[in-house]
Image (tube, rainbow, N blue to C red):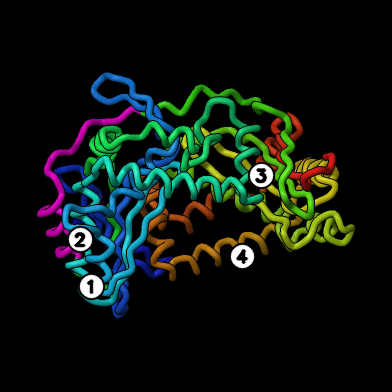
């Protein structure tokens, strides 16, 4: 097992890739009573179309999320009950490009780790349990669709992307999950829950050898086949300029998005993420001149915010909130981005934002959850997240200015708006 020290952030990480292809990462936290295990697969809501064994497969929207719901079922009952008996707090989530299962405990760590590895690697479904879950997930989907924040965001992705599956909801639709059967769940588990497509990260004061021994004993020895994924053939143009939807809300709401080029491989993705985050804070963060001006003019309120995100085959910057004049705010964002790109960002303000973002990255190391999910995301995307100090060192103010100048433009813009039901946009 290799050990890597990161003196700039005071962390030590031990890593090993097992014979079956599973990557194991142990982040040492000496003296902590808490232990956290995170078992993830590179499989999420976007992985609907893939090729395995030379054959292309198309699966229903929402199947990764459905599978996550059913994985806690075991022949003996429920893994949740086993964790509870050992004093652990388990949970799981499905994102666009990852599904993860995890637990938090202070005692019986090895027993809980064995439970985690066992139920994730050995699925158990019945027709009755799959049918019962369909109603539960359908209700969850309907509740989500009635949430304004979710609706305005998913509508924006539908405007930005024509083919990329990021435009589709992770949980699928009531219609799409009706196609899911035990057979399709087993098939997707065989394809994506192979050890070579997974990553195990443990954070806490634990013996790395204990983690490795459990993984070698419980997980299958086979690596699994390589998977080719199809995220659609996407052009640089937005799919649709705008969409307006009516909902039971009191105040109009909007998101404006800008479709950005997809970055390169490995550490370049981490670099682009950091540049994008800096650009957001400089352009419209709550300490930026533009934010304060728009707030003083009454065009935005405390709900206003945004971010930069990267997904397989997709990258975009977005901002919005409650607003009665979204077009004015969108044009103000573009005008300010053009000005910053042409005149440059104030050096003192740039340094202030850079220090704040670097400090936030340092503080995130105190969260076991952030550490583990960041390690898994980095492994799946080909970079070491603990190298963020060196990546920050490589970023110049000119990089952020170029990002704003090239991406926050009308040609890359799309708008999603919600209006109170019964009122015109």
- 2 vs 4, front mark: 2
Stretch in magenta? 208-228
Q: Position of residue 111 (x, y in %)?
A: 17, 67
**Residue for point 71% across, 39% down:** 416
Q: Give the class, few, some or many, for how many residues have Cα within 10 Å of label 2's Cα (few <14, many ≥20).
A: some
The residue identified by callout 1 is 86
Q: Position of residue 346 (x, y in %)?
A: 76, 56
The residue identified by callout 3 is 152
Q: Distance between the Cα atoms at labels 2 and 4?
A: 40 Å
- 4 vs 3, front mark: 3
Q: Is residue 165 magenta?
A: no
The residue identified by callout 2 is 115
Q: Is residue 215 magenta?
A: yes
Q: Secondary structure at mark 3?
A: helix
* Residue 235, quarter of picture: top right
Q: Secondary structure at mark 2?
A: helix
Q: Distance between the Cα atoms at labels 2 and 1?
A: 10 Å
Q: Position of residue 249 (x, y in %)?
A: 74, 52
Q: Secondary structure at mark 4?
A: helix
The residue identified by callout 4 is 356
Mark sitting earlier along the chain (2/4): 2
């Amino acid at each position: 097992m290799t050990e890597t020290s990161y003196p700039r952030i005071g962390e030590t990480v031990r890593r090993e890739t097992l014979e079956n292809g599973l990557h194991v990462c142990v982040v040492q936290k000496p003296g902590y009573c808490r232990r956290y295990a995170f078992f993830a697969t590179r499989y999420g809501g976007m992985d609907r179309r893939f090729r395995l064994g030379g054959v292309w497969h198309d699966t229903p929207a929402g199947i990764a999320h459905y599978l996550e719901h059913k994985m806690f079922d075991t022949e003996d009952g429920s893994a949740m009950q086993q964790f509870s008996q050992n004093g652990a707090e388990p949970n799981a989530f499905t994102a666009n490009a990852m599904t993860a299962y995890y637990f938090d405990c202070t005692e019986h760590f090895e027993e809980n780790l064995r439970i985690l590895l066992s139920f994730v690697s050995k699925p158990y479904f019945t027709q009755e349990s799959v049918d019962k879950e369909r109603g539960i997930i359908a209700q969850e989907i309907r509740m989500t669709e009635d949430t304004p924040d979710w609706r305005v965001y998913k509508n924006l992705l539908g405007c930005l992307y024509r083919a990329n599956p990021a435009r589709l909801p992770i949980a699928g639709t009531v219609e799409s999950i009706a196609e899911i059967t035990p057979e399709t769940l087993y098939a997707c588990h065989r394809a994506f829950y192979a050890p070579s497509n997974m990553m195990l990260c443990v954070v806490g004061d634990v013996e790395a050898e204990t983690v490795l021994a459990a993984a070698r004993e419980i997980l299958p020895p086979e690596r699994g086949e390589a998977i080719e994924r199809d995220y659609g053939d996407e052009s640089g143009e937005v799919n649709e300029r705008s969409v307006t939807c009516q909902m039971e809300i009191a105040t109009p709401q909007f998101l404006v998005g800008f479709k950005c080029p997809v970055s390169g491989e490995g550490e370049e993705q981490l670099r682009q993420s950091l540049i994008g985050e800096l650009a957001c804070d400089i352009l419209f963060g709550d300490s930026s001149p533009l934010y304060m001006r728009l707030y003083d003019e009454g065009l935005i309120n405390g709900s206003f915010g945004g971010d930069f995100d990267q997904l397989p085959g997709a990258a975009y910057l977005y901002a919005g909130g409650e607003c009665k004049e979204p077009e004015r705010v969108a044009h103000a964002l573009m005008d300010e981005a053009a000005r910053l790109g042409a005149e440059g960002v104030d050096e003192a303000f740039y340094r202030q934002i850079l220090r704040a973002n670097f400090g936030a990255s340092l503080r995130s190391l105190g969260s076991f959850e952030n550490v583990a999910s960041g390690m898994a995301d980095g492994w799946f995307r080909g970079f070491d997240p603990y190298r963020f100090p060196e990546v920050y060192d490589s970023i110049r103010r000119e990089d952020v200015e170029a990002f704003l100048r090239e991406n926050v433009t009308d040609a890359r813009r799309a708008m999603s708006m919600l209006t109170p039901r019964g009122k015109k946009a």
